[in-house]
Image (spheres, coloured by chain):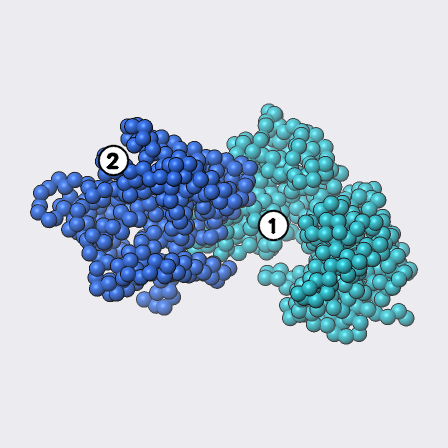
Chain colours: A blue, B cyan
Amino acid sequence: MNRAKVMSFIKANTMIIALVVITAFFVWQTGGKIILPQNVSNLISQNAYVFVLATGMLLCILTGGNIDLSVGSVVCIVGAAGATLMENRDVHWVIAVIFMLILGIAIGAWQGFWIAYVRVPPFICTLAGMLIFRGLSNIILDGLTVSLTNTTFIRLFGGGADCYISDLFSVEGFNLTAMVAGIITSVIYIIIQIQGRVKKIRKGYEIEPIQNMLIRSVIISAVIIAFSFQLSRYRGIPTALVIVVIVVLVYGYITSKTVLGRHFYAVGGNEKAARLSGINTNRIYFIAYTNMGFLSALAGMLTIARFTSAQPSYGQNYEMDAIASCFIGGASAYGGTGKVSGVIIGALLMGVINIGMSIKGVDSNWQKVVKGLVLLGAVIFDVVSKKKNN
Amino acid sequence: MAKVLLEMKNITKTFPGVKALDNVNFEVIEGEIHTLVGENGAGKSTLMNILSGIYPYGSYEGEVIYDGKVCRFTNIKDSEEKGIVIIHQELALVPYMTIGENMFLGNERGRTFAIDWDETYDKADNYLRIVGLEESSRTLVKDIGVGKQQLVEIAKALAKNAKLLILDEPTASLNEKDSKALLDLILQFKKEGLTSILISHKLNEISYIADKITIIRDGATIETLDKSVDEITEDRIIRGMVGRSISDRFPKRESKNIGEMALEVENWNVYHPIYEDHKIIDDVSLYARKGEVVGIAGLMGAGRTELAMSLFGKSYGTDISGRIKINGREVNLPNVRAAIKEGLAYVTEDRKDNGLILGDTIKHNITLANLSGVSNKGIIDADKEYNVAVDQREKLNIKCPTVEQNVGNLSGGNQQKALLAKWMFANPEILILDEPTRGIDVGAKYEIYCIINQLVAEGRTVILISSELLEVIGMCDRIYIMDSGKIVGEVEGDKATQENIMSHILKTSNKGA
């Protein structure tokens, strides 16, 4: 491989390389503690809300670098309302879940309306939302903590001691279900790869060199299997992981394969051109923020389930985690580029840094400094590499 | 013998692919008013941009000699220090600042860390009186009319101790009264010894004010007329501006097959989107038949783009009234989607800003206006999309290694073809092409002309908006001439000459000013 090829490979996979390097760094620094089964499992459970919020945030950012500052407060108010309904009003958890989702969508639509149709700058509108919904959460909870007792709800949304998929097999100390799921996933991945290649060959399209495909399949399968092996050695698949995977798959599909997804990229890439191509750009903004409300509601459920309670302080700085994951994951600060897969890498990177530093016992203030620098570095990289292209 | 204030010698300026100025010589005597005339794109503004240092020394060949010294300006500040001040056609005032703040913007009174506002406003008031404005310099610029803003620009120039004032179409957006006041002011300054260079399209203004007239055409100075020596007539100037012949730069159409009525527009009126009492399109009626290439000629700012965009799903303007018929049936086109559905396409003049998503692939750009053509129930068929893109690339001969390449990396001509491909894939009956050959090389132009011919051969209708008279004459079956938002003339393609189109435009401008 020549130099140019190496450079373009590095450029295309910067964040994956960064993730690998940083993980390796923490494996070395923590003496391997970071890849212990419990920590691997926690990486998902603790950060489930980041994956969900960052996916929604990506859609907002795609429309032109617009962010939603209110998600932390929306997470809190949705959780507060749900917990109050379930615990103080004895509402069935299914009805509470439906209510929470509707509440999130309604809040999203409220902000989306101002942003899309009145053209209030998103930054201002969601800053207002951040204050409004934080205040309302406090009012709903009366400043107090509401403890959750509904074990079904807690378990379903990844909280409590028993938030794992039940093991179908009974092997002592090893959750075979997780292992099997991991193997099935990697087999499906490889089948999809082969199918795609066969289809391309049949239609006479350009195909990539076979070794690229082989190397990629081997690495990804190995990561999936290693990951599920660690999960198996702990307690199996966290339910939160199931929710995250569904969200990621659905939104990954929407952004890459649907007309709606294409419209998001077009609006962010060149709004005027998009409008003159017959795209209803206002509607795209509206959808982005309404959807953000929906995913904030989902994140709200994950949050109260994980803490088995609702408090007026929940969700603080969640918007920052989501925004940071998007930009670290390669979404452009100007909109129009970014992928769900990138956002996942970004969120994982943040998660690894979090857990790694916690294990090392780094002071939480220093953790913030490091995360801030990582975010800045990622965006500088984006801006500089764009400039070079021009 | 009067003193030569400015001499520009053998100026040559090339942009990638285009020679904008070719060995131009230009001389201005101290204390005269010298006008520059020429078609759009002839090179007038380029020449003035070199003079004012916007195109720095080194980016052009030749010499600029001002006040007896060779000048090597690297930016506007350099030229302004010498007293050369340019006032651009587009006003460069900040609306939410006061007149005084604007006047000394970048030239603040007082010290760097302590602006002297009293001195600023006092001096600004003085300059305002000189240009005949009664307003306080503490008035916000947005609160005064366009005519007065233009005078503020001149006052701003005076505040910079201008010795040579360059005005680029200063009256383009002014009404008759304001124009007259402005010209009189320039005449008065002349008496006080100020030298001016004026770029204008309005012949009556030129004959009213000019001492000398230099005609530029295709990046070369054709001649300089002296009011005291030559007899200056409109015909003389027009001939100078357009005097060249149509060679075989345009592909011939095999057979003309002009059919039924495709598009009829009746009594179309459009108002400015921000200044809602400003009428941009004034009672325009036109029609186009199937298989016909209809041209819309006119100068920049005549309202051609605004007309086209307002027709295309009301994407420009407010308070739009009038009727559109497509294939004899009256249609309502409230948005772009509806317009596309009725078979209309508008290919923008500004491919970078309004047409293409430069950071996205050729493939995605081509399918953007017709995603339903490559998708099923909202899900995109990636294979179909790829095939469509490859197919369009072949048809329009877009030169690129793969359709997965970013459209921003293509040359101008190929970008233009990609933009055309996008709209052709939307399969329209009527295409409005706005300046489809601007800024692209001769070869690509020819290819685009061939595409236009092919489109009409298939029975489609093409409306061609162009500032290049030759192009309109060479390509069109019928030509509308627009000026100041009105249709001021209509000529058959085979009877059209550059002279008669130009005289339509210039004669109506005369009436207006």
Type of amino acid at the residue the image marks with label 1? Thr
- Report the disc number at residue A149: 2
Residue type pointed to by label 2: Thr
Asked if disc 2 and disc 1 are in contact, CB closer than 8 Å, the reply is no
Which one is in front, A341 or A356?
A356
Residue located beneath label 1 in the image: B437
Q: Secondary structure at mark 1?
A: loop
> From where the camera sits, is residue B410 visible?
yes
Seen at 66% across and 46% down, the residue is B466
Q: Determine whether, in the image, residue B160 is placed left or right of residue B397.
A: right
Q: Chain of mark 2?
A: A
Q: Point out the image quarter for the C terminus of chain B.
A: top right
Outermost top residue: B329
- Quadrant where the image shows the N terminus of chain B: bottom right
User: Circle 2 sits in a helix, a strand or a loop, which is it?
Assistant: loop
Tell me the quarter of the picture where residue A358 sits. bottom left
B264 to the left or right of A298: right
Give the x, y percent position of residue B296. 68, 41
Q: Is residue A320 left or right of A45 when viewed as pictured? A: right
Residue displayed at 37% across by 65% down: A7
| Whether residue B455 is visible | no
Residue A167: horizontal and vertical position, in percent?
A: 14, 41
Determine the residue positioned at 25% across, 34% down. Answer: A150
- Which chain is home to disc 1? B
Of residues A377 and A102, the one nearer the viewer is: A102
Cα–Cα gap, marks 2 and 1: 71 Å
Residue A334 vertical placement versus A76 (above, below): below
Q: Position of residue B222 (x, y in %)?
A: 77, 60
Q: Nearer the viewer, residue B32 or A298?
A: A298
